Amino acid sequence: MTAPKTLARIAGFLYLIVAVLTSFAGLVNTRIVESGDAAATTGNIDTSATLFRIGLVSELVGAVAFLVTGMALYLLLKHVNQMVAAAMVTFVAVSVAMQSLNLLNQHAALTIATGQDYTAAFGPKGSDQLTLLFAAMQHDGYLIAQTYFGLWLLPLGYLVVKSGYFPKVLGVLLVIGCFGHLVDVFARLLAPDFGANISPFAMTPAAVAELSFIAWLLVKAVRVPEPDTRVP
């Protein structure tokens, strides 16, 4: 049986990989995809095809790491409440499935932007519009998957509070982070301009919570009570 401290550090390391790889993939997409400008997006993808591919693979590896992170935390925290821990892993699995499938849209944008067959079939403007369409679908698909990136923090926060392994404030921050994700998703879906304006404020609690949790897992691991060695 793996010791709690070891499981915690494994989860922390994997969670750090998730944060680094998905952030990198997001930066790549933000740099290359020009919202509303099909020609510029196609040109950027064509000239930075290797970087675009690396971003795609980074997100895929990050998704796998996220699933394994959820499994490690399940093993660490299932003793608190197995049903809640199972719900946590279910949210992670759903988000990873959606995120991985959504990468097909990014790959389609790459294929169209770098292939001559589509330009010949649809013309330069038609091909550019198709590229932008798939790039936009990738963006929106990731936003929908973010619903579950947020929801998994709710059972995780509960388990963190109840486990005694961590400061309770960490669990409270994770629960607040859950609602930050949900506010961001639904604001951007229902009122895109308003959602884009409040997104940094909505996502700040989630970022603080998750980075603090990663740091605690890596540095402190868990608080395991010392055995009572007093002589009766």
Image (tube, helix red, strand yellow):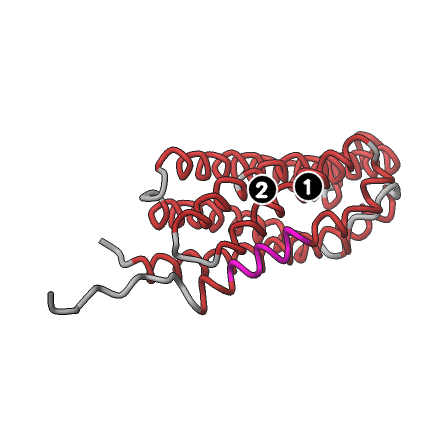
Q: Position of residue 169 (x, y in %)?
A: 54, 55
Q: Which mark is residue 111?
A: 1
Residue occupying image coordinates x 45% and y 62%? 217
Residue 66 shown left or right of residue 104 in the figure: left
Q: Position of residue 189 (x, y in %)?
A: 77, 32
Q: Closest to the observer: 217 or 37?
A: 217
Magenta stretch?
Answer: 205-214
**Residue corresponding to mark 2:** 149
Asked if residue 46 shows in the view, the reply is no
Q: Is residue 207 magenta?
A: yes
Q: Position of residue 202 (x, y in %)?
A: 73, 47
CA gap, disc 1 and disc 2: 28 Å
Give the quarter of the image for residue 100: top right
Q: Position of residue 46 (x, y in %)?
A: 76, 51
Asked if residue 182 shows in the view, the reply is yes
Magenta span main SS: helix
- Residue 85, compared with residue 173, is above or below; it is above
Amino acid type shown at disc 1: Thr
Q: Is residue 137 magenta?
A: no
Q: Nearer the viewer, mark 1 or mark 2?
A: 2
